[in-house]
Image (cartoon, grey):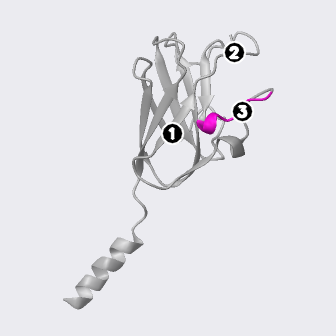
Amino acid sequence: MKRALHVALGALLASPATAADLRIEVGGLRNVEGTVYAAVCTENEFLQPACAHFGRAPATEGVVTVTGVPPGTYAVQVVHDENDNQTLDRPGFLPTEGMGFSRDAPMRFGPPQWRDASFTLEEPGATVRLTMRYFQ
């Protein structure tokens, strides 16, 4: 009996940390049209077209929940797709639709740096708040 308890405890302690739901609260939406897309990215995925953890919600909600995110260091990138064409519209250099990053990372002459947007996700049920930015 004692050995079985030790084996069970050992298996429990050796299990990888459970994945979390990450609630992303988006402020500063200029309207409630379209969809808000959020990607939770590792450093290698940051600023790339796709990240392993992804979610979306109607802009009317202003909140996107991304499920199954394991503990680690991430950055969130968000797009407000106002016309629901599933792309960030940018007819020139500046996008016509909103974008935002975790920690409200500054965008100076281009996208933010990883170090400015990254955060550590340790606990299940964490919340990230960010502000949408529009350039046109």
State the image quarter where residue 113 is shown. top right
* Residue for point 77% across, 28% down: 110
Task: Please tell me whether residue 92 is drawn above or below residue 54 in the rendered image.
Answer: above
Residue 12 picture quarter: bottom left
Residue at point 68%, 13% (across, down): 90
The first of marks 2 and 1 along the sequence is 1
| C-beta proximity under 8 Å, tags 3 and 1 | no
Q: Position of residue 35 (x, y in %)?
A: 46, 19
- Magenta range: 102-108
Q: Is residue 63 above or below residue 89?
A: below
Tell me the CA gap for discs 3 and 2: 13 Å
Q: SS at mark 3?
A: loop
The amino acid pointed to by label 2 is Phe
Dot 1, crowdedness within 10 Å: few (<14), some or many (≥20)?
some
Give residue 135's mark: 2
Residue 128 is marked as 1
The amino acid at mark 1 is: Val
Toward the right, the furthest residue is 109
* Residue 48 pos. (x, y %): 65, 35
**Quadrant the N terminus occupies:** bottom left
Residue 117 % position (x, y): 65, 41
Residue 107, magenta (yes or no): yes
- Residue in view at x 30 percent, y 82 percent: 7
Task: Identify the disc placed on residue 106.
Answer: 3
